[in-house]
Image (cartoon, rainbow, N blue to C red):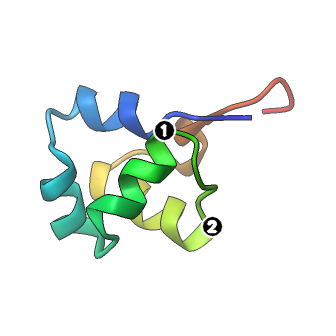
């Protein structure tokens, strides 16, 4: 499964610092999620989706989606 937070954030023209302010998730953690170094929790996905005004399912790609 691929996490698409970078794509979604870029489409909204937000920086990591701005997304950090909107979600309460540190920019380091957001960066790790975007670069595949860590997997987000469901709460983190929900916070990111809410901040970007998108569905949680828009944040990942999977053949089982």
The residue wearing badge 1 is: 35
Q: Which image quadrant for residue 65?
A: top right
Vertical relation: 47 (above or below) 63: below
In percent of the image, x 41 and y 67: which residue is there? 47
Sequence-first tag of 2 and 1? 1
- Residue placed at 50% from the left, 34% from the top? 4
Residue drawn at x 86%, y 31% is 64
Residue 44 appears at what percent x and percent y?
50, 67
Q: Which mark is residue 42?
A: 2
Asked whether 25 or 57 is in front, the reply is 25
Residue most extreme to the right: 64
Give x and y (percent) for residue 12: 20, 34
Mark 2 residue element: helix
Mark 1 lies on a secondary structure that is: loop
- Image location (x, y in percent) of residue 19: 22, 56
Q: Residue at x 29, y 58 (%)?
A: 51
The image shows a total of numbered marks equal to: 2
């Amino acid at each position: 499964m691929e996490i698409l937070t970078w794509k979604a954030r870029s489409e909204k023209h937000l920086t990591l610092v701005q997304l950090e302010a909107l979600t309460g998730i540190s920019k380091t953690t957001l960066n790790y999620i975007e670069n595949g170094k860590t997997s987000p929790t469901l709460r983190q996905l929900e916070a990111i989706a809410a901040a970007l005004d998108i569905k949680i399912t828009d944040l990942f790609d999977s053949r089982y989606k």
